[in-house]
Image (cartoon, coloured by chain):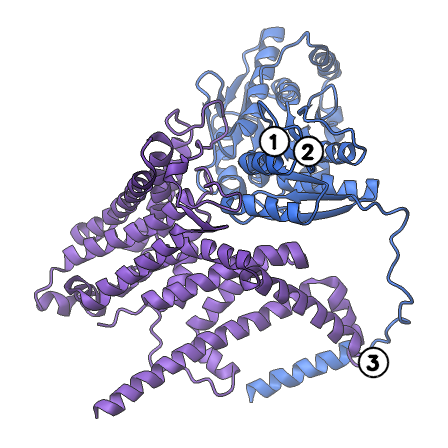
Chain colours: A blue, B purple
């Protein structure tokens, strides 16, 4: 009885939905617009997958940008476990990719081994570089300590409580580099202004700080807990460096009724997290998409080298995002100081230790 | 009388097999629906279902046959594919045997993940620190991994037997402890690869790796099969196995019959942990697609501990069933990677298929209702435990 009811419901729905007139049969398959290149750029994710709202996703955007801007073909493979990495890179070789971009330090071994075995294929790896790279491997790394330094200075200038905080997804070098720069920026502010703004959540000397236990980068609630702890310690500006779990920091800021603000990392949070735009003074950008696009372009134009790419303030691969809605809340003095520090860092007169 | 009883047993077994096969078919059908619904190019064609049925049906057929064709090709379509399936299956079989053994004693070992992590830590550590002759080195590394897994499982058995702590809670918590321990170890000089700051261990010595037989097929797969044989012997032929099954069926009765229930609990959990540790050993010592064993890092064992629960459930906690279930899921994973590469189908689909298969197996009445001529068996116990 029930079955037949469900069945007739389905049939009715299909009758209603399925009566459109098809468009005139396409005369030909949609032709590729413009001069389509046969160049094939491929990407292998780490276990986070391309929907990780973090470095896999940003790198993937670089691949998609390359598809549009360079008129090339692209292909991608996601990895489910660490044990998949080597196999996925091998599958890309078998698909005759011209360049294979791998994402994350964990693919370092598999990428190097594949590059050695296939000297005719170009390789690029995001967030990692080799001491002695094969001729056909390019490391893509980012000195995010530089823009984080500026973010730390900004945070110190914005803080009313005299305490700023940070937390990370895990104690990895690619995470703590942000926290290192941030702490140095705060210290620089103290030196310049004779202030004593404190950093909680990261101690440069002992390399310890607040990190999310368990599911690390995907645990938004864990991030929120850490941000709440930082606020309890008096922090009113937070720098979360935890991929998707950074949202926890934004949530705490959004619920604080203007008392707390939270910076964002990797992309411009004003654009990527519009829901929280009001509480994001600025973001520390990491231009992984631009670096991937550049590496693919070099490979296509046969100008590819194994010289590692390092994103910096100077080449725009690492940047401090615009203040957007916070433009009026940042003093003109701070703005000009940040501009000056940016110039000094680019010129090398102001040193930021990565 | 005896004949009637035997035929009754065989009818039940036939029904169980039919339910399993029916579950796989239903899962594939549900997977096909998901593929169609999630592909805008195909689903939009369904607007023309009655005016031009060839369009949606053709698009659906192309999509589904392409994807499942790639799945089949990647799982069993070539000698290489078979080797990859065996390689993927080996750790699943080991951990599935471990979880299944626990089920037979009425113990829900949700801690296969932590036990596998410790197995991989010990095996990898012995693999990259020691310098031993070829055969001896791999044996030492395997034994190290087994002991580590057995200790991690044994702790749970001890706590359950002596203090009454529930094994589900303890194993889940110990999973976290194991993961964090690995995370911490990888930051210490003993485990961190020289010259590296990211959490990755050195590559193990070649002498410690499972010898390669053909491409990804290595000795590890036969170690897994041997483990299945050993578990069969233990459960069906040994006194201890009888005690395990008796405790699983009715601990009170087993105690009254003179069996030492606390000791059986401890031993079962240790053995379960040992088998799960062997799964970790497979990841640490088994050469991958680049013919080198993957170095120890945070995600080395993947989600084997949780996949193992589904393998054990599908295998009905029987050694032979677990081997087949492990091969099926190993094939789904190997095929899933190929499906992703050849047919541009997301990798998550193979995970969904696994979940759907187990979901249908767990609901035999549903399968019986959906498929004609398939009857649900009278007893629907998934986890075994019968004496």
Q: Is residue B233 visible?
A: yes
Identify the chain of the residue marked 1, using the numbered disc in the image.
A
**In the foreground, A39 or B15:** A39
Q: Badges 1 and 2: C-beta atoms under 8 Å apart?
A: yes
Where residue A153 sits, quadrant-wise, is: top right
How far from the left and from the top, in percent, is residue B225?
Answer: 35, 59
How far from the left and from the top, in percent, is residue A267?
Answer: 68, 34
Q: Which residue is mark 1?
A: A127
What's the distance in space between the residues labelled 2 and 3, CA to CA?
48 Å
Please indicate whether residue B351 sits to the left or right of residue A310 in the image.
left
Residue drawn at point x = 30 percent, y = 43 percent: B139
Crowding near pointer 2: few (<14 within 10 Å), some, many (20+)?
many
Above/below status of A161 relative to A296 = above
Mark 1 secondary-structure assignment: loop
Please indicate whether residue A27 sits to the left or right of residue B75 in the image.
right
Where residue A338 sits, quadrant-wise, is: top right
How far from the left and from the top, in percent, is residue A159?
Answer: 60, 21
**In the foreground, B79 or B178:** B79
Residue drawn at point x = 66 percent, y = 68 percent: B64
**Dot label at residue A288:** 2
Crowding near pointer 1: few (<14 within 10 Å), some, many (20+)?
many
**Dot label at residue B51:** 3
Mark 1 and mark 3, same subunit?
Answer: no
What's the distance in space between the residues labelled 1 and 2, CA to CA?
8 Å
**In the foreground, A282 or B200:** B200
Mark 1 and mark 2, same subunit?
Answer: yes
Number of residue marks: 3
């Amino acid at each position: 009885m029930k079955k037949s009811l469900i069945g007739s419901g389905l049939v009715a729905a299909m009758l209603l939905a399925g009566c459109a007139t098809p468009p005139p049969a396409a005369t030909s398959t949609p032709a590729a617009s413009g001069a389509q290149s046969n160049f094939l750029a491929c990407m292998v994710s780490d276990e986070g997958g391309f929907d990780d709202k973090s470095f896999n996703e940003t790198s993937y955007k670089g691949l998609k940008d390359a598809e549009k801007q360079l008129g090339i073909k692209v292909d991608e493979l996601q990895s489910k476990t660490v044990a998949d990495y080597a196999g996925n890179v091998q599958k890309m070789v078998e698909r005759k990719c011209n360049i294979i971009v791998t994402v994350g330090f964990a693919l370092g071994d598999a990428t190097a081994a594949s590059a050695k075995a296939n000297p005719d294929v170009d390789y690029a790896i995001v967030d990692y570089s080799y001491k002695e790279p094969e001729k056909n491997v390019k490391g893509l790394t980012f000195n995010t300590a530089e823009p984080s330094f500026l973010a730390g200075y900004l945070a110190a200038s914005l803080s009313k409580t005299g305490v700023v905080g940070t937390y990370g997804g895990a104690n990895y070098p690619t995470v703590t580099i942000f926290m290192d720069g941030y702490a140095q920026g705060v210290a620089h502010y103290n030196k310049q202004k004779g202030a004593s703004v404190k950093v909680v959540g990261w101690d440069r000397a002992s390399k310890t700080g607040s990190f999310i236990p368990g599911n690390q980068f995907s645990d938004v609630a864990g991030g929120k807990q850490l941000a709440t702890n930082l606020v309890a310690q008096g922090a009113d500006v937070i720098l979360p460096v935890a991929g998707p779990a950074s949202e926890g920091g934004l949530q705490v800021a959004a619920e604080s009724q203007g008392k707390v603000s939270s910076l964002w990392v990797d992309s411009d949070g004003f654009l990527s997290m519009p829901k929280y735009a009001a509480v994001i003074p600025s973001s520390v950008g990491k231009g992984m998409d631009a670096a991937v696009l550049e590496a693919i372009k070099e490979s296509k134009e046969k100008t590819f080298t194994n010289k590692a790419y390092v994103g910096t303030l100077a080449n725009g691969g690492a940047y401090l995002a615009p203040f957007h809605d916070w433009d009026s809340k940042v003093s003109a003095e701070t703005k000009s100081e940040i501009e000056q520090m940016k110039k000094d860092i680019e010129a090398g007169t102001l040193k930021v230790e990565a | 009388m005896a004949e009637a009883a035997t035929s009754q047993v065989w009818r039940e077994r036939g029904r169980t097999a039919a339910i399993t096969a029916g579950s796989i078919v239903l899962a594939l059908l549900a997977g096909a629906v998901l593929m169609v619904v999630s592909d805008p190019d195909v689903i939009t064609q369904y607007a023309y279902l009655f005016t031009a049925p060839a369009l949606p049906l053709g698009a659906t057929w192309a999509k589904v046959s392409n994807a499942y064709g790639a799945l089949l090709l990647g799982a069993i379509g070539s000698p290489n594919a078979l080797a990859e399936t065996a390689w993927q299956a080996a750790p699943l079989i080991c951990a599935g045997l471990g979880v299944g053994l626990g089920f037979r004693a009425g113990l829900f070992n949700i801690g296969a993940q932590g036990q596998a992590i410790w197995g991989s830590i010990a095996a990898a550590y012995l693999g990259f620190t020691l310098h031993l002759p070829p055969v001896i080195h791999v044996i030492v590394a395997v034994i190290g991994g087994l002991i580590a897994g057995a200790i991690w499982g044994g702790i749970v058995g001890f706590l359950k037997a002596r203090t009454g702590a529930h094994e589900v809670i303890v194993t889940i918590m110990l999973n976290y402890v194991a993961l964090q321990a690995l995370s911490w170890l990888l930051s210490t000089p003993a485990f961190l690869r020289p010259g590296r700051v990211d959490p990755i261990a050195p590559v193990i010595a070649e002498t410690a790796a499972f010898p390669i037989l053909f491409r990804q097929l290595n000795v590890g797969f036969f170690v897994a099969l041997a483990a299945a044989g050993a578990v069969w012997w233990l459960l069906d032929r040994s006194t201890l196995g009888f005690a395990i099954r008796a405790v699983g069926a009715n601990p009170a009765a087993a105690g009254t019959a003179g069996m030492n229930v606390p000791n059986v609990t401890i031993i079962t959990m240790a053995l379960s942990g040992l088998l799960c540790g062997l799964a970790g050993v497979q990841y640490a010592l088994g050469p991958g697609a680049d013919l080198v064993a993957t170095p120890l890092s945070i995600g080395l064992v993947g989600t084997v501990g949780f996949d193992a629960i589904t393998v054990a459930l599908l295998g009905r906690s029987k050694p032979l069933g677990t081997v087949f279930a492990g091969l099926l899921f190993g094939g789904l994973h190997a095929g899933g990677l190929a499906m992703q590469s050849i047919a541009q189908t997301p990798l998550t689909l193979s995970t969904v298929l696994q979940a759907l298969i187990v979901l249908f197996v767990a609901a035999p009445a549903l399968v019986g209702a959906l498929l004609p001529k398939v009857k649900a068996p009278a007893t629907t116990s998934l986890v075994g435990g019968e004496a």
